[in-house]
Amino acid sequence: MRHITLMYAIRKRRRLHPRVPKLHPVLLRLREIYELILEHPEPSLADLTKQFFQGKSGDLKAKLEESPRWFEKRLRRGRCLVMLDGLDEIADDSQRQAVSRWVDRQLKDYYETPFILTSRPDAYKKAPLYENAIELEVQPFSTKERNTFIHNWCFNWRKNTTEGRVNTEKARQRAEGLIYQIESSPTLRLMATNPLLLSLMARTHVDKGKLASKRVDLYGEVCQVLLEGRQRYRKTTEAVLSASRKQGILQRLALEMTKAGMLQFTLDNKPAKEGTYTQAKALLQAELSRVPRHAPTPEEFIGKDEVGVRELLSDRQQEGLYEFAHRTFQEYLTAAELKRTGRIDCLLNAFAVGEQALAWWRETIRFYAAQADATAIIEAALKEEHRSVAALALAYECLNDTENLDPATQQKLEQELDRGLHSSDLEEFRLAARVLLSVRLNRLNTDMREPQTITDEIPEIEDSEYVTWAEYQFVQDQILLREMAESERSMPSPNRKAIPDAKQPVTGIDIWDAYQFCGWLSQMTQKQFGETAQYRPQQPFDGRIQLVRFRVPEQYQPLAYYLSTGQWQRADQETIKVMLKVAGKKDQGYLSVDDIKHFPGVDLRLIDFLWVTYSNGHFGFSVQEQIWLEVGGKLDFGRDKQAASAAFKKMSDRNGWRVNGNYISYSQVTFDTSSAPVGHLPGVVVVCGDVSGGGGGCVDCAGVLGSLDDTCWGMVFLFSRIQTCKV
């Protein structure tokens, strides 16, 4: 927001975008004006701005005083860009909602003026805008976005640290070196999807020349660079506290917060919001009092760049709340402090308390095991009273992370897993197989604590190892058990023949069995993480299963599940349902041509991606569009409905919507990839009639779906929209 304001203020707005309009920027921090809104909720934006700038200096104040109606006129004519920053910094939910209602009124009153409102997602969900607002959310980087960011970062770093002309070749080489290191490590690839962590990795790479391949070492390097880097770049030797001393203080704060089950703290003495650590000031005062000369105050330590630790924290000034820049920094620092003290009772107790406590401490335990002796941790997980999938999976991950483990303990864990995988006892096998599968899912889903919404691109994470026979057989057993339960058949015997190659990659699997396996994993992941991860087999498929994981917004999870499990009719019906919801036409019950003209491109791309992915290229809107173009269909027939109808007939003959010269009804649709023609699904949803009663949307001239002309014309606009959105 400040960057946009600056670019407009110095008349270099075209740096933002070549076609950005000429506007007057207005940046208002809601934490500074919300009390004025609450006291007088009726005044307009123009009146409130004038009131806010009273008593302040500057050209805008003088302009407002000289011509009171100047600002109002520009707002009315759409000549301003109004930026309202930090809705989330209004602590009280009811006050935040009142401010949102006021913003809604301004959007309505100044309907020609563009507004930008920023907020953290959780706060906005409790106080959303309703007046024609488009919601956007910061997304994880795709591979292309990540590489673009790295190249731009390296170029600008050299520009800011060298005199004269930037050596673009050196900047390019540095960027390519960082990209190569990230691509060489699955851990770094996953971390690099987060914009904040990627920027920290870039800074560390510049400072160190090379990134540590181990996650725990990388976090140590990042902390060192952030805690000492600013003084180094300023060439300042007068540091009140060394980087190691600062980190030691932060480690103790992180440990106490983690023990208390909290992710934010305050330095205020007044009552804080629930879930806020309130003893931070006392802890920091005690630690800083041991500094012999010029000891900073807790406020200085937290807030001053040259003194403290500001770059490792994020803050919400109005609420007086602070938290670590990323949750994993708190977990890393907690583990580092436990290593320093050697007192790990809190980690061992997590195994005894239960799975909820183990989930809270899980990443801290892994960070600890990666830099200390993991023997006690794994021994705790192996205790009979702690025996669970979560405990054994965590122990197995610690085995892979650690460089210090008693050989007898390692052998005990490996024998425990191996015995279960090759056991003829069904329950022992299930436990061991679930451990293997849980380790795999944990590895693929370490980013699941980050929010996710719909995005232009669908970032994917590729697994580095093939699925084993044990994991595959476990999932097949679960599918069989579910089918037996639904049909009320008797359950299988608890004993069966052991799998001899349990830890070897599964081979010779049919592609549709692989998709069924992926569909079940999606359900399992949702139960474990409470999120909507989806999986597909790596392509080209060779009979082995190498997972590719991607995430979809929650409203698309049912569609993804039906598609992944081959429930094509349910998927077709869910497609219509979700499209009506996205378009805001749920009550209307159908999509008109105008609705499809304005259908959100990111949603259309995602729906098509899911259909094409899970049908192995057999179904999907883009598949239908390709057939349309191949038979001579156009994306714009003007007013020539006769030509459009002729193309629609040819397409329908190809994809099975017309049989023996007659259009089929919805009851005649084939919901089977083995017999349905290519492009047969999804059914037509762009019709000028009601599809809610038909259960689907294929061509049915005699039914409730509207005339053939309406359906044909709707398809023209659907394919045109697909082309526009680059599906």
Image (cartoon, rainbow, N blue to C red):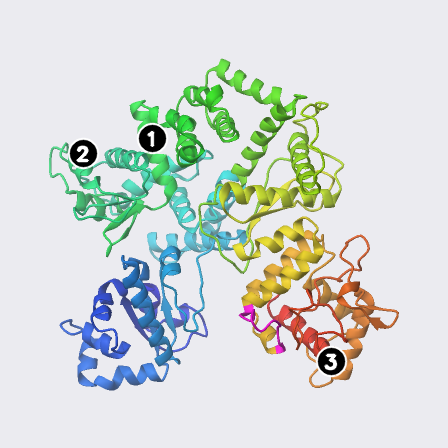
For label 1, the residue is: 336
Image side of residue 297 versus residue 229, left or right: left
Q: Nearer the viewer, residue 539 or 234?
A: 539
Q: Are marks 3 and 2 in contact (CB under 8 Å)?
A: no
Q: Where is residue 411 in the image (x, y as percent from the top left)?
A: 54, 16
Under mark 2, the amino acid is: Glu
Residue farthest to the left? 293
Instruction: State the SS at label 2.
Output: helix
SS of the residue under disc 3: helix
Query: Which residue type carries mark 3?
Result: Asp
**Mark 3 vs 1, N-terminal side:** 1
Q: Which mark is residue 287?
A: 2
- Majority SS type along the magenta span: loop
User: Badge 3, how many Cα within 10 Å: few under 14, some, many 20+?
Assistant: some
Provide the residue span drawn in magenta: 583-593
Residue 428 sits above or below residue 521 on the image: above
Q: How would you rate the neighbour count of disc 1 (Cα within 10 Å): few for under 14, some for 14-19, many for 20 or more?
A: many
Is the residue 357 above or below the residue 414 in the image? Answer: below
Q: Residue at x 37, y 78 (%)?
A: 108
**Magenta stretch: includes residue 663:** no
Badge 2 or badge 1: first in the primary sequence: 2
Q: In the rendering, at what x and y percent does residue 7 appear?
A: 34, 69
Residue under pointer 3? 709
Amino acid on which disc 1 is placed: Ala
State whether residue 552 is above or below residue 277.
Answer: below
Q: Distance between the residues labelled 2 and 1?
A: 17 Å
